[in-house]
Image (cartoon, rainbow, N blue to C red):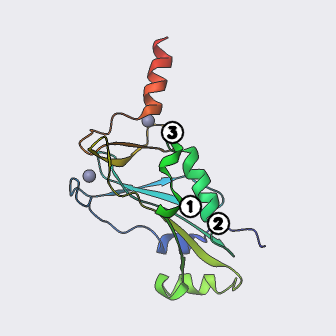
């Protein structure tokens, strides 16, 4: 097994998320939040202004799909961790030609490695007959994220970890 590598900057730029809109929630533009998810790759959370997550993506340069490691890392950032289910994670190999000439040339220098991407997508689900979605809170420091499920009409201000910290401060 070869140790996975960081993506070369030119490849990371080629993979940079394209704009999108929050589908079937608020239709507002999604923002890509770069997160420190697993090493040595790079993670992005695509979320609307209310914090509803469209998709979370991780990518590295390696010889195998990092799906299990990414699942573990996501569980550490999710309240409760059980929301991260293996069947909601999809892995894909991204090839040079689709990323542009320069990226393709750079990737050709290590033919033993591939760009390994993992996508985590949670569709709306019912809890006590109320539609819930996956939200993300980015108020925990640079590169940090907390995922949590909440009713679809939530304002995005009910992060359970923020609530714990507020209680701690009041004491
Ligand atoms: Zn939205
Ligand atoms: Zn929070």
- 55 sits left or right of 118 in the view: left
According to the picture, the residue beneath numbered tag 2 turns out to be 6
* Above/below status of 18 relative to 162: below
From the top left corner, tell me how far across and down residue 3 is, in percent: 75, 68
From the top left corner, tell me how far across and down residue 75 is, in percent: 56, 48
Query: Would you call the spot at circle 1 few (<14 residues within 10 Å), some (14-19), or many (20 or more)?
Result: some
Mark found first going from the N terminus, 3 or 1: 1
According to the picture, the residue beneath numbered tag 3 turns out to be 141
156, 108: nearer the viewer: 156
Mark sitting on residue 42: 1
Dot 3: element:
loop
Query: Would you call the spot at circle 3 few (<14 residues within 10 Å), some (14-19), or many (20 or more)?
Result: few
Q: Residue at x 70, y 82 (%)?
A: 110
Q: Residue at x 26, y 62 (%)?
A: 21
* Total numbered badges shown on the rendered structure: 3
Mark found first going from the N terminus, 2 or 1: 2
From the top left corner, tell me how far across and down residue 107 is, in percent: 62, 82
Dot 1: element:
strand
Mark 2 vs mark 1, CA separation in Å? 8 Å
Mark 3 vs mark 2, CA separation in Å? 22 Å
Name of the residue lying farthest toward the top: 171
Ligand 2 neighbours mark 2 (CB distance < 8 Å): no
* Above/below status of 111 relative to 25: below
Tag 2 and tag 1, C-beta contact below 8 Å: yes
Mark 3 vs mark 1, CA separation in Å? 16 Å
Which quarter of the picture shows residue 19?
A: bottom left
Tag 3 and tag 2, C-beta contact below 8 Å: no
């Amino acid at each position: 097994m070869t140790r996975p590598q960081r993506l070369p900057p030119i490849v990371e730029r080629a993979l940079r998320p394209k704009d999108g809109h929050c589908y079937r929630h608020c239709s507002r533009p999604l923002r890509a939040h770069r997160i420190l998810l697993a090493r040595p790759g790079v993670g992005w959370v695509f979320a609307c202004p209310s914090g509803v997550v469209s998709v979370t993506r991780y990518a590295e340069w390696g010889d195998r799909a990092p799906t299990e490691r990414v699942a573990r890392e996501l569980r550490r950032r999710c309240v409760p961790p059980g929301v991260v289910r293996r069947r909601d994670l999809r892995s894909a190999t991204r090839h040079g030609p689709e990323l542009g000439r320069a990226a393709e040339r750079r990737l050709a220098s290590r033919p033993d490695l591939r760009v390994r991407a993992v996508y985590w997508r949670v569709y709306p689900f019912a809890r006590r007959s109320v539609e819930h979605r996956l939200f993300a809170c980015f108020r925990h420091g640079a590169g940090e994220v907390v995922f949590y499920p909440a009713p679809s009409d939530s304002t995005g201000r009910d992060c359970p970890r923020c609530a714990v910290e507020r209680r701690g401060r009041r004491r």
